[in-house]
Image (spheres, rainbow, N blue to C red):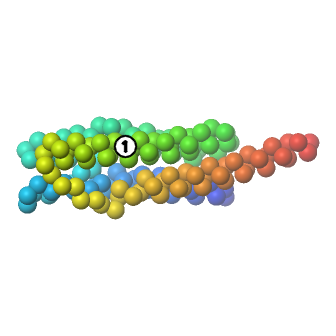
Amino acid sequence: MIQRVQTIYLIGSIVLFVLMLCFPLGYFVLGTNISSFDFRGVQIGPDFHHTLAISVILFIAVICETLALFVYRNRLLQMRLATFNSLLQIAFYIALVSYIFLYQGQFKVTYSVNWTVFLPLLTIVLNILAYKAIRKDETLVRSLNHLR
């Protein structure tokens, strides 16, 4: 399992997801008050505002990526999970931008970007690389089956 290059790509993607869960996605600034915005939500003023969509997307992505790592004998399912995970990351960006615009319009805050916002782009690249490597393995296995 570990000797395949797509396994390295999938493990790298899982590590990036864990980093997204550990660090804030950005900061909202309201006057002198700075609130960190992470996957759980953001504390603006006295109220805590949950970001359920981002939490659900990240947890589903981690589960799908881990599942894709362990179903290495079913290459077609692995390719589908890599594609689905890339689509989840696009949905993550849509949800993130929606929450940013919602909070900026509702509370008149400014958003400061953190480096973890760019990690889903890296996971998309790693998923594309894993997809290509899995497809290469699948074509090799199919060509060997034709020789029999």
Residue occupying the point 44% across, 45% down: 90
- Give the quarter of the figure containing the C terminus: top right
**Which image quarter: residue 47?**
top left
Given residues 101 and 144, the one toward you in this image is 101
In the displayed structure image, the side of residue 54 where residue 87 appears, left or right: right
Residue occupying the point 19% across, 41% down: 49
Q: Is residue 5 above or below residue 47?
A: below
Given residues 37 and 108, the one toward you in this image is 108
Residue occupying the point 33% across, 37% down: 53
Outermost right residue: 148
Residue occupying the point 22% across, 42% down: 102
Q: Is residue 19 above or below residue 60?
A: below
What secondary structure is marked by label 1? helix
Query: Please, what is the three-letter code of the amino acid marked with disc 1?
Result: Ile
Residue 6 image position (x, y, % from top left): 62, 54
In the displayed structure image, the side of residue 128 where residue 53 appears, left or right: left
Residue 22 image position (x, y, % from top left): 32, 54
Outermost front residue: 105
Disc 1 crowd rating (10 Å Cα; few below 14, some 14-19, many 20+) is some
Residue 141 image position (x, y, % from top left): 79, 46
Residue under label 1: 94
